[in-house]
Image (cartoon, rainbow, N blue to C red):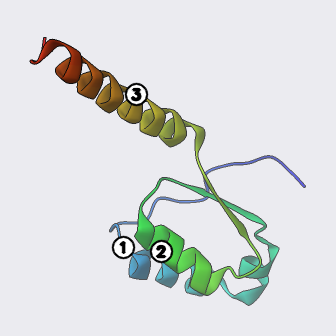
Amino acid sequence: VGSARLLDMVPGRSADAFGDWLDARGGTFRHRIRVVTMDGFTGYAKAATQHLTQARQVMDPFHVVHLAIDKLTACRQRVQNETMGHRG
C-alpha cells in the first residue's frame, strides 16, 4: 500500500486545475490512486469524481477538526445568545 504523501502543489483552486493535473499524469497513474485526501472544497471532489472513479474521497484530519470546532462554536454562541439574550 505504501505511505501517504503530498504529490504536488498545483497553482489554482478549481476542479479544472486538479483535473488537468491528473490528466497530465496519464491513466496508469490515475488508476493506481485508491484514496484522495482533501479539504471540503467541492471543486476537488468534482475533479476526483470525474478523473478518479475508483478512488475513495476522504477529508483530511486538519479540516475535519476545523469543521467540528466551527460547528461547536456556532452551537455555543447560539445557546449563549438564547439563554443570556446577548453575546458575551
Can you give x and y, in whole percent of width and height, for residue 73 in the image?
Answer: 33, 26
Instruction: Kindly identify the residue that appears in the image at 47 percent across and 34 percent down.
Output: 68
Q: Are marks 2 and 1 in contact (CB under 8 Å)?
A: yes
Which residue position holds label 3?
72
Please tell me the numbered disc located at residue 18.
2
Residue 42 vertical placement versus 69 (above, below): below
Instruction: Kindly identify the residue that appears in the image at 80 percent across and 46 percent down.
Output: 3
Residue 32 vertical placement versus 4 (above, below): below
Q: Nearer the viewer, mark 2 or mark 3?
A: 3
| Distance from the alpha carbon under mark 3 to that under mark 1 | 29 Å
Query: Split into 4 quadrants, where in the image is the N terminus?
Result: bottom right
Judging from the image, what secondary structure is the residue with disc 3 in? helix
Can you give x and y, in whole percent of width and height, for residue 78 in the image?
Answer: 25, 28
Q: The disc labelled 1 sits on which kind of residue?
A: Ser
Q: Earlier in the sequence, mark 3 or mark 1?
A: 1
Q: Are marks 3 and 1 in contact (CB under 8 Å)?
A: no
Which residue position holds label 1?
14
Q: Earlier in the sequence, mark 2 or mark 3?
A: 2
Instruction: Kindly identify the residue that appears in the image at 41 percent across and 61 percent down.
Output: 41
Q: The disc labelled 3 sits on which kind of residue?
A: Leu
Can residue 9 be seen here? The reply is: yes
